[in-house]
Structure formats: structure tokens, C-alpha cells
Image (cartoon, rainbow, N blue to C red):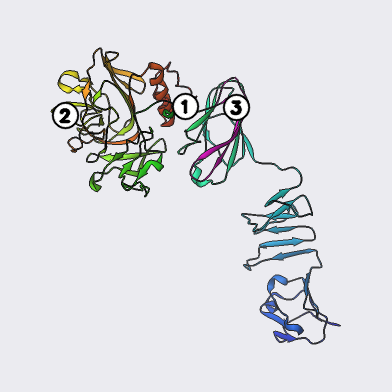
Amino acid sequence: MGISVYDFRNLNSRVTSEGFSSIQINHLPYDSMNNASFNMPYGLNIRVLALLLGMTVMICPDASAAFRSPSGTMSFDSNADGTADMTLTTSALAVGQGLSPSTNLHIQGNAMITNDMVVGSSSAGNSTLHVNGSFGTGMETLSDNVTIGNVNLVLADSSSGNITLTLPYAGNVTGRRYTVKKTSTSNEVVLSGGTTNIDSGGFIVLTSGNMAYVNVASNGSQWYIVGQSPSGSADAWTPADITTALWLDANDTDTLWADAGRTTPATTDVYTWDDKSGGSYHAVQSSGTEQPSTGGTAINGRNTLAFDGTEYMSTASNPFGATISDAHVFQVFKTASTLVQGANFSLTEELGANDRFSVHGPWNDGTMYFDPGDASTNRISSASWATTDEVIMASFYSSTTEGTKEVWKNGTSSVSAASATSQSVTGGIIVGDFTSGGNSPQKFDLAEMIVINGTVSTATRQKIEGYLAHKWGLEGSLPAGHPYKGAAPTK
């Protein structure tokens, strides 16, 4: 038994049914549908809204209800704006405003599945996502120096020359994986971690003469290699592959601390800057007014430490012992908008007037002064060496063993002399000044500093230059003929 209602306008908006097996509603005017409801036996209540226009409602005494459409399509307009937000046909469901289903399930926008999902089977799977059959992923072919987008597979075409592909920031794509496949045996493909590392280095190289591949994944803080071809790929060379006396890397924010105990990561002022050489010669500044800051400056998208002309750091002890005989110091930095009379570093506290191993690079007039020993007798200099707001990769070398001292800027020699002298040591290494008294602090953004105790071959110097240049975006400043101008060094 049932009752059919064709027009609510002459009925009470609330109808009680006793003994009817169904209530059928057909073609009701829009205004008569609003807020209409039926109380049924067994406590069932159904509210009929405007979205039911043109549909059939079947209500049965066993407290079950079914919606039926004579046309085979139901459209749900939750905003009552005349555009359906969900459309259901006899074989498909579309969720999205104005969307018509083109597959059995068609969703416009994001979707979330709380439990497991099985594709291609009517049986339960054994994984969160179980695919019974094939599946595809987004892919693209790249042949220029670009940042990889929202695809999983990249075909790297290096047939026209070396290319560098940069991964997106790992912190924004936690869990994402990429496969990069070289499609030409010509030239090299460098996969860069951008502002974060890939494993312990900044990049990986798919070498010339091969068509290698590499798989990487983000854990939310950096990228990791999770698979690669057995040949044709090479891990990036880093200073970890040689013996260093001190290695400070501002882009490795895991080495920057806000306290002496190295328990609180630095977000602004830096109390402790960890040494990555393995010798634990950490740079420290306990005075809050003299601490450099992190997070506000960068070179090539990589973090640097800002020294404002009043700030410096120093190590508690010195890796050179009592005497400096052979030393090579590398720094990458950006000069200030106003040059000051500052010192970039000193490998010892000043023992007396001008008695130090230090660099003014530059002085306030742009001149570079290298003092590997008593400045009155051992200084070499280069006028107009730097300008304001200039990014520089510099290295400073003095060797009594080889009887030479020399300065390089971006891989090119600036000045040299065929003499060198040893320097007595007291105290630690000063970063951003030539004394821990704050007598001549430099104003610059310091990216990285590498110190080597001993002689350094040309091949090693050029490897370090290649590593720093490609990491900090200075490869274009390397001279023609430099072995790592076109590609970073590999192991």
C-alpha cells in the first residue's frame, strides 16, 4: 500500500503516514520541497530537500529508504546555486561542481581514502594500495637546466650538452619519489638537491658514455638515493672525501645551534656552528649581541650566515697545534652593500701588532689583503679585488714546504709570491674577524669555509673549487678550461 504526492502546496509540511509501504514524490515545485519531512513508523524521519526535484523517494516499513530517478541521473546541488556538486548515474559518480562523470568514479580536486584501496579486483587486497593490473605515472622529457615539476619519471636528454636538473625543496614534498633516466650517452646530467642534500652531498652525476638512472625520495628534510643503475652514475665529490682541519657549511642547518649544548636548532642567532671535518672544532659565540644570524640571507637559494660588522665566532682550540706551516683556506661569501674594514678570518689569535694569519677580503676600498704571518713583511694584496654585493669564491694558500703564497678568486689567481713563512699559534680559529676581541669584524654573508692543514695540490684545489662553484651557483665564474666548469667533481 502506498501514497503518491504530486503537490505539497495544499498539504501540511509535515505528514504522518501509518501503514503505507511507500511515499512517492514526483515533479514537485521547488518552493514546496523546502523543509518538507515525513515521520514514518519505526522512528524513521526523512527530510525532502530541493535537491530531490524530479526524483522518487521510496520509504518502506522496514525502515529502509531508496532514492530513484526516472531519468537515470541524480544531481545534488548543495549550494542551491543551480550547479550540481555531485552527479550520480546508473554507472558512474562525479564529485565536483558542474562535473559530468567520464569514468565510473570521477573526482574533481583532492580525495582522501582512510582505509585500504583496491584497484582492478573485487577481492580484498593486502596493502594500503593494491593494484591488480598495470598503472601509469606522470613523465616528461627535459633537456634544459630546470627544476623538476609534479611528475614521477624524468627522461633527461643531454644530447645537446650537459644539463642540471634541480629537485624541488624536500620539505614541501615529503614522501615524493623521482626517477631520472638519462636518454643519451653524450654529456652529463647533474641531479641537484637544490637547497637540500642528496644523501651527504648536494648532487649526483649521471656520467657521459652511459644512459644511467637514479631514484630519489624525500623524507621531508632532504633527498635520499633509494636506487640507481650499477654503472654510469657517480656520487658527488665533497670535502668529506679529503682530510680537512675545519669545515663550516651554513646551508647544512643541522649544524647551526642556538645554545652551547647544541640541543636547540638555531632559527635566528647562532651560538654554535658545528665543524663537519670530524675534529669537533666548532665555532662558538656566547655573546648574544655578537652572534651571526641564520635564515635571513642566501646564495643560490642556499642558507648563509649574516655577519653584520659587529659579529664573529671562534673555535675553542686550534687544529694546527703550535705552528702553521702549510694552510689553505676556502670561503664562499657575499660582500655587503657597504664595505667595511673587516677581516674574513684568522687561523690564530693575533700574537702582536700585525702578527697573525688572516685575510681582509675586502677592505673598505675593495682591496684584498692576505697576511700569512707578520703583515709588515709577509702581506700580499690585490687592489679593486671586490665590489659591493658581490658573490665570491676565494681561496688563500701559504706553504713553507713549497715556498709560495697565493690567492685565487673564482678559480683564477689574483696574486702570488714565491715566499712563505711559518706562523706561531695561540687560541683558536676566528671566523669573521682576526681576533676574538672583535677588533675588525667583517660585514658579509658567509656560506661555507673549508680549512686544510698541509699542502694542497692543484688537482685538489680545483676539485674544491668545482664543488663550491656548482653548489653555490658560481660555475659560470670559473675560468675557461677549468676542469669542473661544465660539471661538478665526482668520486
Q: Answer left or right for 133 relative to 128.
A: right
- Asked if the stretch drawn in magenta spans residue 228, the answer is yes
Residue 157 disc label: 3
* Residue 479 x/y as whole percent: 39, 19
Q: CA distance from mark 1 to mark 2?
A: 37 Å
The amino acid type, in three-letter code, at marker 1 is Trp
Instruction: Indicate the secondary structure of the residue bearing disc 1.
Output: loop
Mark 3 or mark 1: whose residue is earlier in sequence: 3
Mark 1 or mark 2: whose residue is earlier in sequence: 1
* Residue 240 x/y as whole percent: 43, 29
Name the quarter where the N terminus is drawn. bottom right
| Residue for badge 2 | 351
Residue 286 appearing in the image: yes
The amino acid type, in three-letter code, at marker 3 is Asp
Q: Nearer the viewer, mark 3 or mark 1?
A: 1
Q: Residue at x 43, y 15 (%)?
A: 481
Name the image quarter holding residue 116.
bottom right
Query: How packed is label 3: few (under 14 Cα within 10 Å), some, or many (20 or more)?
Result: many
Q: Residue at x 40, y 24 (%)?
A: 464
In front: 405, or 336? Answer: 405
The amino acid type, in three-letter code, at marker 2 is Leu
